[in-house]
Image (cartoon, coloured by chain):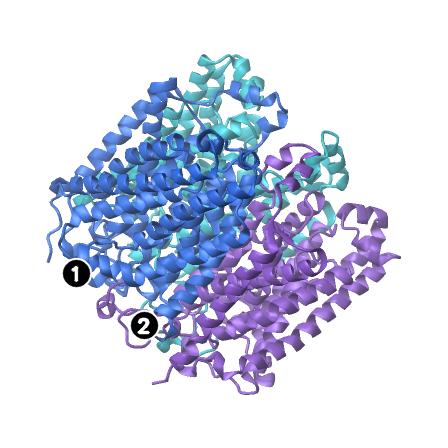
Chain colours: A purple, B cyan, C blue
Amino acid sequence: MATPPPASARRLLPLSLGLFQGALLLFFALFVTYDEPSAVATEAEDGTRAAEQLPSIFPLFQDIQVMLAVGLGLLLAFLPRYGLSALAHNFLLLNFSTQWALLLQGLRHRYRHGELRLGLHNVLAAEFAAVTVLISVGAVLGRTSPCQLLAVAFCEVPVYLASEWLIVTQLGVRDVGGTITIHVFACYFGLGVSKALFGTQRQPAHPKETPTPRSDLLALVGTLTLWVFWPSFMAAPCRPGDAQRRAILNTLLALSASAVTTVVASSLLESGGKLSPGHLQNGSLAGGVAIGALADVPITPAASLALGSLSSLICLLGFRFLTPLLARRLALHDHCGIHNLHGLPGILGAAASAVAVLVVSKDTNRCQLSQVDGSGVAEDQGGCGGGRQALWQVTGLAVALGGSLLSGMLAGAVLRLPCLAPPPEPLCFEDSLNFRIQGQAESPGMGDTTEEVALKERV
Amino acid sequence: MATPPPASARRLLPLSLGLFQGALLLFFALFVTYDEPSAVATEAEDGTRAAEQLPSIFPLFQDIQVMLAVGLGLLLAFLPRYGLSALAHNFLLLNFSTQWALLLQGLRHRYRHGELRLGLHNVLAAEFAAVTVLISVGAVLGRTSPCQLLAVAFCEVPVYLASEWLIVTQLGVRDVGGTITIHVFACYFGLGVSKALFGTQRQPAHPKETPTPRSDLLALVGTLTLWVFWPSFMAAPCRPGDAQRRAILNTLLALSASAVTTVVASSLLESGGKLSPGHLQNGSLAGGVAIGALADVPITPAASLALGSLSSLICLLGFRFLTPLLARRLALHDHCGIHNLHGLPGILGAAASAVAVLVVSKDTNRCQLSQVDGSGVAEDQGGCGGGRQALWQVTGLAVALGGSLLSGMLAGAVLRLPCLAPPPEPLCFEDSLNFRIQGQAESPGMGDTTEEVALKERV
Amino acid sequence: MATPPPASARRLLPLSLGLFQGALLLFFALFVTYDEPSAVATEAEDGTRAAEQLPSIFPLFQDIQVMLAVGLGLLLAFLPRYGLSALAHNFLLLNFSTQWALLLQGLRHRYRHGELRLGLHNVLAAEFAAVTVLISVGAVLGRTSPCQLLAVAFCEVPVYLASEWLIVTQLGVRDVGGTITIHVFACYFGLGVSKALFGTQRQPAHPKETPTPRSDLLALVGTLTLWVFWPSFMAAPCRPGDAQRRAILNTLLALSASAVTTVVASSLLESGGKLSPGHLQNGSLAGGVAIGALADVPITPAASLALGSLSSLICLLGFRFLTPLLARRLALHDHCGIHNLHGLPGILGAAASAVAVLVVSKDTNRCQLSQVDGSGVAEDQGGCGGGRQALWQVTGLAVALGGSLLSGMLAGAVLRLPCLAPPPEPLCFEDSLNFRIQGQAESPGMGDTTEEVALKERV
């Protein structure tokens, strides 16, 4: 029987996390307040109604929370004996990363403008930082301890914030849905972590790694939850009005095309025309990843459909051919296939956004484009039109890709520290490593009768 | 061991679906654009605010997507070994039917007005068409191949669009929640398909047809999801304002009465005063089906409650007495009991709408009624008041019922084509027919230990 | 084998429930109408737009319905063989209690102002009454019959309405999120019921009481659903504008701190640094319970974080030390640990609200505070400032605590009536007691193969 890590090592989790929570509290006590009521007064000048309405971002914010806490959590629960851990770790990382991003944002803001006045948009921005962590850890799911996961979050959030600032604010890259800044960045950060953590040793297929129809069903519910609320994820960072409307429709069309194309491609790739549950869980979302960089660009509906189809096709080809190849050649471990869902469609979306910017700027008067999207970014940066903007899109992709891979490998090296209590191989993919499973000596089988396991009281 | 259909037959799914996706793309490329920015400019005349707001339909649209993708999918997952297939097929049909309805709508629009300018309301209308397909296939769940299901969708969507145009636009039937145009239509279309597909052969009870407490639990979660968001389904097609408010409250009351009455009736119908999970899953929603035709009519709260109670009563009586009778006498196979959830309460709701229109028009000044609901339909069609409108309601019901039964039987005849790869009897109700279940030679048991089944890598 | 209650006793459920449904229908027919269209006309004076919008409370209302029907239901489904019953009873009680509260509200309204004009806010107020019932029954989950649960609801709703009127309307206690009026009240009512029902007999740990990883997973999904939508629960009763914005942010921060602190504390309290699923399911929500009484008070963000952390800490300490102590010393049976999730954090929140009112009134000009929150309550009641308001907060807590405990014990005494068909001990925590499980003689094991159990037709 494998020895679990010594208890002393496991004290690191509560101690470090508790310390962090204390530091956050101190920082908030010293430097953070809410938007003052006076802020509402100024708003009231252009109509009292505004002050009395629910923030229009709130329903979108709630949708995104459902995606991150429930949808993504369930999607990761495809491992039959690791569902509880996947869901719980996802939840912990969501909260930790959001708080950590809030703290870092607050520090930057304080350095520049003084006290941070917290609003819903700050929390939303922090959650976007958390998304990168939730995606990245998919590469090492099941073979890492909670301490290691927190270390990933600790390293990734500041790098993401810097990268996002560089790409969007400095380079003026258009990326309203985070195709480049979130998906590509998170994917290659995660792959970097995985490579540096597991080195050149090939991970054998673990017997507990295989999903069952039932765990696949739960994961599919997670996919559907993400699929349904994806348009809200796109609409939230958009300026209300025309751009938001366009982002919603583009996303709907891309996701719909992805869903249908996934069935086509999976049926062709699998023997006997059957479908693979994993293909369905991932491919249906690929269109949402790819459309992010051009959701608010005035492309045609047909372009959204085509991008959605193409991205799910590339995603499934990745699962079928690239993942085994990378595992064989580079000993690259990517447990959830984040390279297929976030990496490949992300690169495709970034490339498409460069093309789209080029085409749209030729079609329309530049001034009109800038007025339509209201961002003014193109005007400031592009100077003489779409060509330069297209170049920035590609530059942004390169920055995200290179920066994340490098920083991810550094983070992965940190994760090799023994004090982070990596789980022993036989206890990988096993809820009992992280949770007190009642009445069971070691690893609980899903099929155990409750009579056998029930000798202690609940909690 | 039963022979699965030959691989050649299974190539039909990806080929036909891929072809369809290509045709859709071509059609969109040639004939569909988004609402022009200029459209926003005209809106802006009556206040700039409107242009800057999130479309007010969007939260309702998202609620409806949750209902269709997650709620309905889970409700169909009551079969313990067919949950993955039920969820996935529901998802595929939702996307295919929506796209197909968009294409058909676009064709009609192009023929009449030129280029289609796509907006969220078009997608919503297309999803309503998809709902009919999702309901209809409930009658043949588990005994059909994906190709057969797509054939149902292919046949049903155009007939639905024609029937909806005839009933609502031409006859002026009031049916804001789709009681007649969606539920009654879909139910009898599905029964027609079932009858024509299975003919006079009685389907023996399949050993895998029996739900377990666990699959019943998931299905109940699906019911609850549908139950919660049903008011949004009613509110979405309503004109904002008074009619929408009324639709929400009427639906809430009807659903609440349904839930309580279902417990009463199920407890009386089952031996020992126990409840039947199937009754709960279906009866609780019957009120929502029935209230659709009169949700925006100014009826009293008591009428909504009464209709909700009555409809769930009729639904459970259908499950208890009518379904076995139909199976015995007509060899009619209705696997999910769609006749009890959609057929009987739909007819009840249609009848109630005729009575309600009659009563309301007596109570209120006609002009006022027409002003209240803002539809103007009654005025155009009814001429001399509620009597004629009541007649139209009944006519609409008859048209929906007759047309759907007939067209359903024709569609069912199409489904008998051997090239659609009907599943062999022993592989019915079995996820392994449609999905690659890892490491398992044939049919995976839910209780199998993962060790036994895990020899291959994930995807 | 244990004898189930005689069928005659089980007829009580449908009969009493049917009678209630009839009485409700009669009452609605005689005394309830909807808001008149004329009401819209008056609204229209200050801008036609208002009349044409979706009620702004509606999205929040839907969020709350998801919490109550799906989230709370799944949270209670942590018992592996009682999930269906937990979900179904939760649903039944939600509907019955809402209807019963609507009826009682209507009676009071009729007595004072004549006919009740039903709006969405009435339904929302009635659902808040229902929440208390759903919380209270957690103390006796699994050991009670549906009739007993309905008796709890029958007793609790009127007492809650009286208590809420006394505490909020008469004493002017600030409690926008129901910390005192809902959580503390419901908790001690439930404990009173449990004590009076089970008396001094200690309940042995039942073999079916132990959750499995899979049932814990579903319960965690319930927790996450509640966690995500909790801010909507706080925002719904707030006046739109500044107070609502503050309530949302305070709740978000408190919940986030709760989630992280729960992991810290659970890891310290459990052996080997593991987490307890039960801790995670409950502790993550403790911050939401505690913040209710001061969500709209202008406290600092740091205060929300601190309260969130502290409340989950107190919740977990309760699970670890207080619950076993109470079970040993007082033979107090609290199956879901409602005392830890609702009682302790509720008392903490009430105390914090007294302190906050005191501090805030010193910091800000009283007039400003009153203007900020717009409630005017402080002005009417507080007279000379925060000191008196703080006193009222404490008084409100005492009233809720004492009143609920007393009335709960009376209700518990009613529950001992044999005609309410208490379940025999061996059939406790067993779905087959309440549901017809197909093809199974007695208690269905979760691992049973469907072949063994499937001999009858579905429904």
Return the x and y of residue A164 as percentages of the image width and height: 69, 63
Q: Relative to residue C379, is residue A123 depicted above or below?
A: below
Q: Nearer the viewer, residue B28 or C29?
A: C29
Picture disc at residue A445: 2
Residue C49's x, y, as percent? 62, 28
Q: Name the residue: 43% across, 83% down.
A: A425
For this view, does A2 lie left or right of residue B377?
A: left
Residue C90 in view in this figure: no
- Whether residue B275 sits left or right of residue B135 in the image: it is left
Chain of the residue that carries numbered disc 1 in the rendered image: C
Q: Which three-letter amino acid code belongs to the residue tagged 1?
A: Pro
Q: Quadrant of the N terminus of chain C?
A: bottom left
Can residue C392 be seen?
Answer: yes
Residue A401 at x, y = what percent?
A: 69, 72
Q: Residue furthest right?
A: A384
In this view, A342 is above or below A332: above
Residue kind at label 2, given as amino acid type: Gly
How far apart, in angstroms, are the residues tagged by discs 2 and 1?
A: 26 Å
The mark found on residue C204 in the picture is 1
Callout 2 touching callout 1 (CB < 8 Å): no
